[in-house]
């Protein structure tokens, strides 16, 4: 009977999930703010749903990772070797925040490929890992 009780308790706690909302800005870009909201085990960044590879939130931490795709095609082209280019960036972003202190970090692993604007040919490609320190506040958490 005791085993059934613990099994029931485990199932109830694994089905429930915490919901939280907070705002973070990057240490090197203090005017850049993003709103993170986790509800019903789904992540929203600035009110846009983001498909996560993993997501964990409780009263102590908020932690998730997701793949992203970024391009400069709709923006002003960047310059590589004094030629007009555009880039496509594919990456994995890992985000973790201590909800008690508001301090967090993001690690971005990505591959960036630069293409020529006129011929569409690959100009160069490189991998990079970027780490950012986050300052977060405005926590609300429900469980």
Image (cartoon, grey):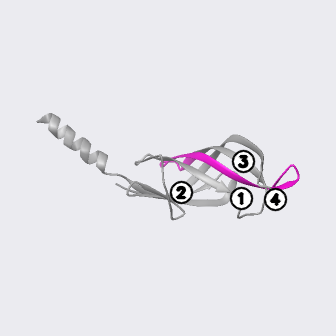
CA gap, disc 2 to disc 4?
Answer: 45 Å
* Residue 125 appears left or right of 52: right
* Nearer to the camera, 97 or 91: 91
In the image, which disc is placed on residue 72?
Answer: 1
Q: Which residue is mark 2?
A: 137
* Nearer to the camera, 87 or 11: 87
Residue 107 against residue 47 in the figure, above or below: above
Task: Nearest to the eye among marks 3 and 2: give it.
Answer: 3
Q: Which residue is mark 4?
A: 118
* Residue at (76% x, 55% y) in the render: 120
Q: What residue span does the magenta drawing correspond to?
A: 78-105
Quarter of the image for the N terminus: give it. Answer: top left
Proximity of marks 1 and 3: CB atoms separated by less than 8 Å: no
CA gap, disc 1 to disc 3?
Answer: 11 Å
Proximity of marks 4 and 3: CB atoms separated by less than 8 Å: no
Rendered location of residue 64, percent (x, y)? 49, 47
Let me know if residue 133 is in the magenta part: no
Task: Nearest to the eye among marks 4 and 3: give it.
Answer: 4
**Mark 3 closeness class: few <14, some 14–19, many ≥20 residues within 10 Å:** some
* Residue 20 appears left or right of 95: left
CA gap, disc 4 to disc 3?
Answer: 15 Å
Proximity of marks 1 and 2: CB atoms separated by less than 8 Å: no
Q: Which residue is mark 3?
A: 113
């Amino acid at each position: 009977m005791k085993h059934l009780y613990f099994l029931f308790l485990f199932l109830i706690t694994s089905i429930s999930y915490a919901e939280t909302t907070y705002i973070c800005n990057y240490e090197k870009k203090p005017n850049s703010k993003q709103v993170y909201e986790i509800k019903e085990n789904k992540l929203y960044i600035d009110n846009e749903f983001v498909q996560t590879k993993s997501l964990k939130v409780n009263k102590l931490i908020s932690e998730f990772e997701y793949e992203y795709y970024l391009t400069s095609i709709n923006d002003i082209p960047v310059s590589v070797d004094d030629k007009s280019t555009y880039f496509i960036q594919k990456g994995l972003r890992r985000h973790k925040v201590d909800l008690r202190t508001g301090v967090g970090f993001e690690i971005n692993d990505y591959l960036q490929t630069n293409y020529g604007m006129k011929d569409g040919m690959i100009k160069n490609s490189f991998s990079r890992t970027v780490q950012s320190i986050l300052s977060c506040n405005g926590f609300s958490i429900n469980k």
